[in-house]
Amino acid sequence: MKFIIRLFPEITIKSRGVRQQYIKQLKKNIRHLVKPICELSRVGGCWDLLEVETDPSTSTAQIQAISDALTRIPGIHHFMETQEHPLPDIEGICTLTLSTVAERLQNKTFAVRVQRAGIHSYSSLELQRKVGAYLLEHSSAAGVNLTSPDELVLLQIHHDRLFIVGRRREGLGGYPLGTQENVVTLMSGGFDSSVAAYQMLQRGIYTHFVFFRLGGAAHEEGVKRVAHYLWSQYCQSHQVKFVTVPFEGVVEHILTHVDQGLMGVILKRAMIRCADQLARKLKTSALVTGEAIAQVSSQTLTNLQIIDQTVPRLILRPLISANKQLIIDQARAIGVAELCERIPEYCGVISQRPTSRAKLTEIEAAEDAMDSLVLQDAVTSAVFQSITQVLNETPDIPQVEEGQIASEPDDRVVIIDIRAPDERESSPLKNQGYPVIELPFYRLHSQFANLDQSKEYWLYCDQGIMSKLQTQNLLSAGFSNIKICPARLLAE
């Protein structure tokens, strides 16, 4: 089997030196992925097309694996699975073509197309007619249909070689990975950041992943799976890093020191400032986010401009004008949607009155009042891992239990209302005979150990999402006296 690979068209219009550089890098990337599948395969070709040739001993499964890998390598426009032969005379071409495609043509209409390069005693049209007539006479095809055939028989002749094409498959397009500078993508594990990272890879820009941990082990595990999938499918020819930044302390600091309306923008600026320092360590050129205009309050043009002024480093937003459904559709097309859907929902900064038109002077004044050491501690505590290692140690995510309501309130049980203060004020809890402590979720990890550990604590929030995440976090930290407050208890 020989795979004939056509380059992404934009590569072919580059200057001679740049084109040669891109082709050399693409061959290197192909070789890196194909050799582990079939050690005896050969990657060749030069100016117009590349070739991957397999050894005769290569199994059908290996050939399929190589074909699948080629569909996921940036820089390839399309490729064809072919059988190569020394170029015979016209009768020999007819015989070889019949032996290759006869089974495909059973009870189907067909058309023959010939593409030639070189000098021959016949024209492409003449050869098409002769091969077509031969196939019609000697196969069980239903007939010839030149406009919309069931099967297209494609022959390519390059000087003294004949290629009988079995199947054409589309590639990713874009430029080969390694021909552009690399970047850092801020990963939440959701649809937006995942598709943004993919679009960078498709353009030939390989990316490291930075994750700001806000929601505990389950959230981190889910994001690692998304990042590893993107790397394994579309970037395996290059080694990248996954960086976990413990950001719980930064969130707590923002929620306790910043005005409600400014929280979202300041959190984004804190992430950008942190990512900039990590990008310097990783020697990357730009940051990538999944932001799109007006999707949330921090993504208005005014607020994005303020976020951009946080650092001088370039911030790329490939999804800036995309709508949500288009993003979700692309996530499904690249195979990452199911993983994204499993990511636990988490919003570290919940503001009831976020501003859509922040003023830079107000933002900078609020940041000046914050303790800069909190952010620096997060940067210092960041954990760098090779993307190949992120799934080696799967964390033991504890099972969360719901508190059991007894006929009479248990003296040991205390309800912790983990909602933000403004949420509590707008919807106070009804007293059901249990003592209630008001402790916002962003203070739990720093203050829970100070509570009476002889008690059993039930966490409450409106939707149950935050209480589940915080219960998992505390169980992972070694506490065993923590459960979710049953919603029906407070509805009675």
Image (cartoon, rainbow, N blue to C red):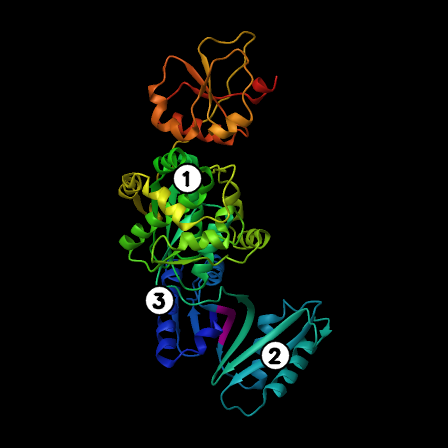
Q: Is residue 238 magenta?
A: no
Q: Which mark sits nearer the N-terminus, 3 or 1?
A: 3
Amino acid type, residue under disc 2 in the picture: Arg
According to the picture, the residue beneath numbered tag 1 turns out to be 221
* Magenta span: 77-84
Amino acid type, residue under disc 1 in the picture: Glu
Marker disc for residue 113: 2
Helix, strand or loop under label 3: helix
Q: Is residue 297 above or below residue 113?
A: above
Q: Is residue 476 above or below residue 288?
A: above
How many other residues sit within 10 Å of disc 3, few (<14), some (14-19) or many (≥20)? some
Residue 334's x, y, as percent?
52, 54
Asked whether the residues under the numbered discs 1 and 2 touch, taking CB atoms below 8 Å apart as contact, a structural biologist would say no
Decide if residue 391 is in sight here: no
According to the picture, the residue beneath numbered tag 3 turns out to be 28
Asked whether the residues under the numbered discs 3 and 1 touch, taking CB atoms below 8 Å apart as contact, a structural biologist would say no
